[in-house]
């Protein structure tokens, strides 16, 4: 019964979405206030209906209803409850429902927090989001129904893929989808602006918080995925340039360009065409990612079970949404207006260069991801494009962007002077070059890549320190007052940029200085790595709710002092008979000690791999800082919005008197 | 104004490729050995371990070289097709048992029928690597001079047989 | 007296040894460390053909283990990286390489990003130069001016 209610909810939601996608937009074009006013209630109704469907599916999973095909293929009676719920988005159909639900959440959020928007703009924004929703609901109802029944019902489920039975599964997909889908708001704002012909600083100011919020979620989602892969897969890798990872990284790059471009459009009224195009691109790349994961066009460890029929549907949807929006762009962008004048050397030009660099980076990732498909489609053979290619190409591309990050915030708007900038930055430059040369030598190993990475990281550290010092110094008021006087969005920028530096430092150090050993260990054996001694205690058998495990123990000592204990394990998940490794990790800011249990060998020994990963946690600390910076910037706006709303409320009694 | 059309144009080009991609298989690995001499090997036979089989023995004849294993599910699917073909006698079929044991292989052929004139045993899979085998079953059509004319990746179906393999075999036999 | 002491000392040593309190050094998994470095380096460059997009280094698949063993034997024979890669490419095609070789068909792939960077930089420079000469937007009319001041009132906190 409940699955049928869920199915019915989706059908109703489709009808509501169709209404949401048509009436408000036509109403905005015609100035029909009633039709425009339908947007908000329809948005709320859509949310309630899709949320209801989601709850029905979650209920089916919680109650182990194996008469629903999707539940039978992704769950099992021994699966713990939290993973049964996470399994809702563990497969193709359910993840689409998650997509649709998150889209309805963003839609209803926009309907709730848009009182300050002109009615026609709000109507168009909600209308566009409604149209996107139509696409996803139609897709589900036509070829990917999560509520399809299995008759006769299975006795037990096929179980969720053991790789996904992890807290990471509870966090990573929802965060990621909040990000991907969140860019639909920026997209809708852009389309609304093109439709209404209203593209000005106010528009930029309204769309900024939504875009930043989506960007924060996407940053956290990618960070979560990377960290999850690191501890889950057993060899300490954290980024593989897999097609689906690239599919999340490209919107991130476009989104980063977008938030910078929006800042310029808001403050200076420039870059309008760029900003609109970036907003369209960021969301288009999200949709492209959806296509790549589900169509079977590319191989990926993350791909869902593929079906060319579904791929065709999404492709048609892509052509409609992206093709339509780019056509609208080509038609309307020329009328959008030029914006202010600025010099060849100015903050605007540095930010424009940033736009170009990030766009080139995103395009390069796209090129590498799709290139094997291009050649195959043209009959020119089959190649593979993997980490060696991306690592080689990406670092040089990002170098100029990271370098400009130090200069942009210091440059003046409209007109800056290169000699003056060089003078201000000479100390930072010197410190960065010195560190890049000296530090690796002290650590025992210098390569050009290590030098470059350290230079860029310390360049950003030094220029940020310079920037903060310049802004803060002055003896008139206590430090705390001075700090609070500076808007949070500025602090957000500083922290986010520092996050990039922290990230770059982590990547450089771990890639340059990590080490590993692969040994055979009998109980009592000792291995040595990076000054630490690892004593093997042997392996104990243990049991989990749906797996059996062999858990090893390694005592880690340094100079005879016990530091920690690592417990790498090998699990066998009984339902799918699938083996899994659980690494034993001792994380710390200075380094991670990482152990992974291999196979039992003939003589009673075990093969063990031990890794020393210096500063690897800085990678995710940097991402967290970027997200924190974004949140700080967001809190700046909302504060002002609340204050203004209070002012408006206070004004009203006076107006009544007048 | 023209430059505002550029994103749309680029997008449509990409869509064209994505559309074409829907009909392609990104995991299929075409063999670079086609139109090259079949790699030489000398492996013990399944029926008589004292005897060896080598592609040298087949010079002057057109023949099918089918790589299979008793643990392979898809091999079960193509087995009836190969049996039918072996009964027609159009082209001799030789098999290579890949990464398997003699017992399992013999049992499998006893149960399912034996379409092969002889089966070579590639127990450690090295000859398979030389032939670019990555997933059984795989079938090679080899001509009279010992050159690989065609490689079928995946099971041989009636359709593949009718449309690709048999016409090719007939053409090669006429040479 | 002395021989008695010696006897005790020897017995003590034997006793300590037999109690296996003597820590054993773990032996490396690989028989040849130098060869293994080359195997690891190559494994990170080559694709596992039966996996869904993984390197030979990351894969547990049987074919991946077999291929790594082949590479190990070739490395032990002293073959160079390029020779080993050529060996595998001869059997499996360019597909097995994660670093695409530079050929006429991959020129666009390898040079594309940098060409685009240069084109982008050049286009940027031209646009910036052109902007210096472009006139500002036309001044606001009375209606627009009123709208602006209204908005500015509301946005006073910015």
Image: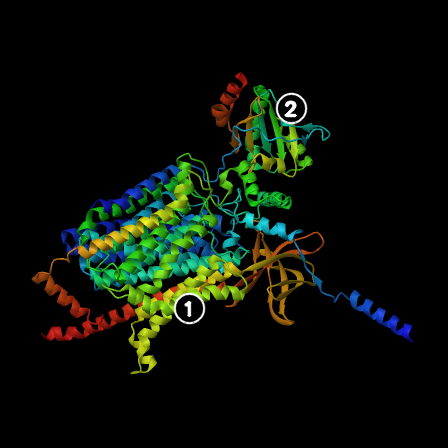
Residue beneath disc 2:
B57
Q: Chain of mark 1?
A: A
Label 2: few (<14), some or many (≥20) within 10 Å?
Answer: few
- Looking at the picture, does residue A259 appear above or below residue B107? below
Label 1: few (<14), some or many (≥20) within 10 Å?
Answer: some
Tell me the element at label 2.
helix
Toward which corner of the image does residue B143 lie, by quadrant? Answer: top right
Q: Residue at x 35, y 71 (%)?
A: A466
Q: Is residue C46 left or right of residue B101?
A: left
Q: Nearer the viewer, residue C20 or A103?
A: C20
- Looking at the picture, does residue A477 appear above or below residue B12? below
Q: Residue at x 40, y 36 (%)?
A: A377
The reply to whether the C-beta atoms of the residues labelled 2 and 1 are less than 8 Å apart is: no
Residue A263 position in % (x across, y down): 27, 62
Q: Is residue B80 left or right of residue A104?
A: right
- How did the renderer colour the structure? rainbow
Q: CA distance from mark 2 to mark 1?
A: 73 Å
Foreground: disc 2 or disc 1: 1
| Residue A9 showing in the rendered view | yes
Residue B46 position in % (x across, y down): 68, 31
Q: Nearer the viewer, residue C73 or B53?
A: C73
Residue beneath disc 1:
A431
Q: Chain of mark 2?
A: B
Residue closest to the far top:
B174
Residue A647 position in % (x across, y down): 20, 73
Q: Nearer the viewer, residue A420 or A577?
A: A420
- Looking at the picture, does residue A486 appear above or below residue B8? below
């Amino acid at each position: 019964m409940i699955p049928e209610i869920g199915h019915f909810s989706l059908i109703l939601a489709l009808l509501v979405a169709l209404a949401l996608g048509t009436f408000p937009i036509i109403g905005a074009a015609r100035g029909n206030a009633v039709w425009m006013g339908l947007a908000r209630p329809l948005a709320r109704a859509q949310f309630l209906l899709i949320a209801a469907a989601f709850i029905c599916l979650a209920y089916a999973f919680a109650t182990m209803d194996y008469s629903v095909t999707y539940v039978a293929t992704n769950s099992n009676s021994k699966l713990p409850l939290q993973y049964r719920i996470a399994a809702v988005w563990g497969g193709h159909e359910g993840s689409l429902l998650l997509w649709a639900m998150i889209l309805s959440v963003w839609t209803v959020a926009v309907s709730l927090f848009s009182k300050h928007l002109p009615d026609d703009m709000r109507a168009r924004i909600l209308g566009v989001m409604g149209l996107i929703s139509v696409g996803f609901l139609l897709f589900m109802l036509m070829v990917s129904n999560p509520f399809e029944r299995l008759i006769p019902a299975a006795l037990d489920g096929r179980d969720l893929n053991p790789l996904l039975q992890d807290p990471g599964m509870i966090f990573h997909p929802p965060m990621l989808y909040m990000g991907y889908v969140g860019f639909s708001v920026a997209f809708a704002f852009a389309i609304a602006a093109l439709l209404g012909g209203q593209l000005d600083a106010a528009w930029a100011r309204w769309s900024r918080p939504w875009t930043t919020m989506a960007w924060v979620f996407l940053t956290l989602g990618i960070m979560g995925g990377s960290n999850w892969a690191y501890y889950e897969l057993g060899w300490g890798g954290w980024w593989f340039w897999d097609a689906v990872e690239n599919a999340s990284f490209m919107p991130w790059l476009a989104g980063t360009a977008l938030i910078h471009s929006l800042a310029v459009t808001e403050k200076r009224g420039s870059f309008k065409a760029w900003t609109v195009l970036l907003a369209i691109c960021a969301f288009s790349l999200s949709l492209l990612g959806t296509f790549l994961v589900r169509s079977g066009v590319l191989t990926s460890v993350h791909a869902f079970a593929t079906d060319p029929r579904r791929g065709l549907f999404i492709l048609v949807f892509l052509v409609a949404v992206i093709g339509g929006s780019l056509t609208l762009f080509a038609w309307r962008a020329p009328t959008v207006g030029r914006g202010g004048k600025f010099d060849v050397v100015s903050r605007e030009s540095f930010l424009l260069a940033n736009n170009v660099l990030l766009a080139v980076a995103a395009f390069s990732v796209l090129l590498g991801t799709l290139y094997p498909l291009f050649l195959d489609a043209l009959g020119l053979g089959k190649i593979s494009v993997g980490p060696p290619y991306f690592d080689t190409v990406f670092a040089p591309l990002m170098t100029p962007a990271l370098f400009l990050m130090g200069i942009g915030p210091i440059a003046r708007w409209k007109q800056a002077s290169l000699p003056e900038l060089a003078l201000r930055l000479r100390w930072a430059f010197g410190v960065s070059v010195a560190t890049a040369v000296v530090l690796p030598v002290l650590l025992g190993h210098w390569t050009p890549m290590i030098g470059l990475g350290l230079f860029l990281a310390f360049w950003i550290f030094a220029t940020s320190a310079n920037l903060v010092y310049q802004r803060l110094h002055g003896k008139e008021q206590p430090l705390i007052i001075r700090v609070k006087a500076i808007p949070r969005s500025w602090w957000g920028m500083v922290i986010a940029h520092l996050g990039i530096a922290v990230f770059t430092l982590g990547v450089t150090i771990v890639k340059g200085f990590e080490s590993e050993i692969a040994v055979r260990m009998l109980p009592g054996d000792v291995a040595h790595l990076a000054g630490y001694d690892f004593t093997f205690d042997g392996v104990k058998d243990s049991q989990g709710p749906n797996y059996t495990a062999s858990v090893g123990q390694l005592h880690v000592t340094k100079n005879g002092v016990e530091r920690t204990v690592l417990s790498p394990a090998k699990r066998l998940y009984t339902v799918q008979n699938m083996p899994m490794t659980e690494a034993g990790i001792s994380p710390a800011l200075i380094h991670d000690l990482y152990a992974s249990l291999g196979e039992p060998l003939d003589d009673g020994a075990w093969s063990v791999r031990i890794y020393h990963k210096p500063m690897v946690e800085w990678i995710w600390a940097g991402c967290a800082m970027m997200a924190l910076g974004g949140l700080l910037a967001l809190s700046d706006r909302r504060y002002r919005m609340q204050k203004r709303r209070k002012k408006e409320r206070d004004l009203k009694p006076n107006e009544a008197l007048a | 104004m023209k430059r505002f059309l550029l994103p749309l144009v680029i997008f449509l080009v990409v869509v064209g490729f994505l559309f074409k991609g829907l009909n392609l298989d990104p995991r299929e690995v075409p063999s670079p050995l086609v139109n090259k001499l079949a790699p030489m090997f000398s492996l013990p036979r399944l029926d008589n371990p004292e005897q060896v089989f080598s592609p040298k023995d087949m010079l002057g004849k057109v023949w099918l070289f089918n790589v299979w294993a008793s643990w392979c599910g898809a091999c079960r699917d193509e087995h009836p097709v190969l049996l039918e073909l072996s009964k027609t006698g159009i082209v001799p079929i030789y098999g290579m048992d890949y990464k398997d044991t003699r017992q399992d292989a013999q049992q499998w052929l006893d149960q399912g029928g034996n379409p092969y004139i002889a089966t070579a045993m590639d127990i450690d899979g090295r000859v398979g690597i030389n032939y670019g085998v990555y997933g059984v079953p795989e079938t090679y059509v080899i001509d009279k001079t010992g050159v690989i004319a065609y490689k079928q990746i995946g099971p041989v179906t009636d359709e593949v047989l009718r449309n690709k393999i048999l016409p090719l075999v007939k053409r090669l036999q006429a040479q | 007296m002395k021989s008695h002491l010696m006897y005790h000392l020897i017995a003590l040593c034997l006793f300590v040894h037999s109690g296996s309190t003597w820590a054993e050094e773990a032996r490396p998994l690989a028989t040849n460390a130098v060869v293994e470095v080359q195997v690891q380096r190559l494994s990170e460059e080559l694709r596992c053909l039966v996996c869904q997009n993984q390197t030979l280094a990351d894969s547990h698949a049987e074919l991946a283990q077999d291929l790594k063993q082949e590479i190990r034997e070739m490395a032990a024979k002293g073959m160079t990286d390029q020779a080993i890669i050529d060996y595998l490419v001869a059997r499996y095609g360019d597909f097995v390489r994660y670093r695409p070789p530079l050929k006429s068909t991959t020129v666009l792939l390898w040079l594309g990003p940098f060409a685009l960077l240069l084109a982008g930089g050049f286009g940027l420079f031209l646009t910036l130069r052109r902007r210096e000469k472009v006139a500002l937007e036309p001044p606001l009319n009375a209606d627009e001016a009123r709208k602006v001041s209204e908005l500015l009132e509301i946005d006073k906190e910015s």
